[in-house]
Image (spheres, rainbow, N blue to C red):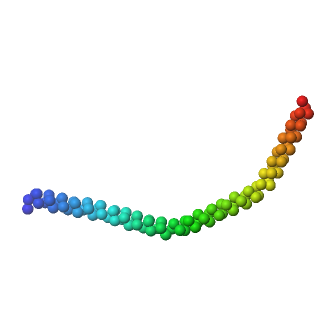
């Protein structure tokens, strides 16, 4: 058995190891991608329903906050208008 024989054996041995070391992560990545695709397919409907509920809650909250805030804004606006009218009358009276 010459050195060329052992060189060829070691090259084949290293190639087998490299193939196995490449194959294992590739198989793991393949099944991870398949699992993630399956999970996304199963959860897409649930996320759509949750988004619909979230949109309804957002709309109701916006409507209620506008109903509560509108009278307060109107009162504040009238008070501010009266204050400015009073200031302008007082300043005009001093001149």
Tell me where residue 53 sits by quadrant.
bottom right
**Residue 36 x, y percent position in the rendering:** 44, 65
Q: Who's the residue at 56% across and 65% down the image?
A: 48
Residue lying farthest bottom? 42
Return the residue nearer the eye: 33 or 49. 49
**Residue 31 x, y percent position in the rendering:** 38, 67
Q: Is residue 80 left or right of residue 24?
A: right
Q: Is residue 87 left or right of residue 47?
A: right
Q: Who's the residue at 62% across and 63% down the image?
A: 54
Tell me where residue 29 sits by quadrant.
bottom left
User: In which quadrant will I find the C terminus?
Assistant: top right
Q: Who's the residue at 26% across and 60% down the image?
A: 18
Residue lying farthest right? 93
User: In which quadrant will I find the N terminus?
Assistant: bottom left
User: Does residue 63 sit above or below 87 in this rendering?
Assistant: below
**Residue 65 x, y percent position in the rendering:** 73, 58
**Residue 42 x, y percent position in the rendering:** 49, 69
Tell me where residue 91 sits by quadrant.
top right
Residue lying farthest top? 95
Tally the numbered discs.
0
Return the residue nearer the eye: 82 or 26. 82
């Amino acid at each position: 058995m010459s050195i060329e024989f052992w060189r060829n054996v070691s090259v084949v041995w290293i190639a087998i190891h490299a193939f196995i070391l490449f194959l294992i992560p590739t198989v793991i990545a393949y099944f991870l991608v398949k699992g993630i695709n399956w999970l996304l397919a199963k959860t897409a409907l649930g996320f759509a329903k949750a988004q619909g509920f979230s949109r309804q809650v957002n709309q109701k909250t916006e409507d209620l906050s506008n109903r509560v805030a509108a009278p307060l804004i109107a009162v504040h606006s009238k008070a501010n208008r009266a204050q400015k009218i009073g200031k302008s009358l007082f300043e005009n009276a001093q001149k």
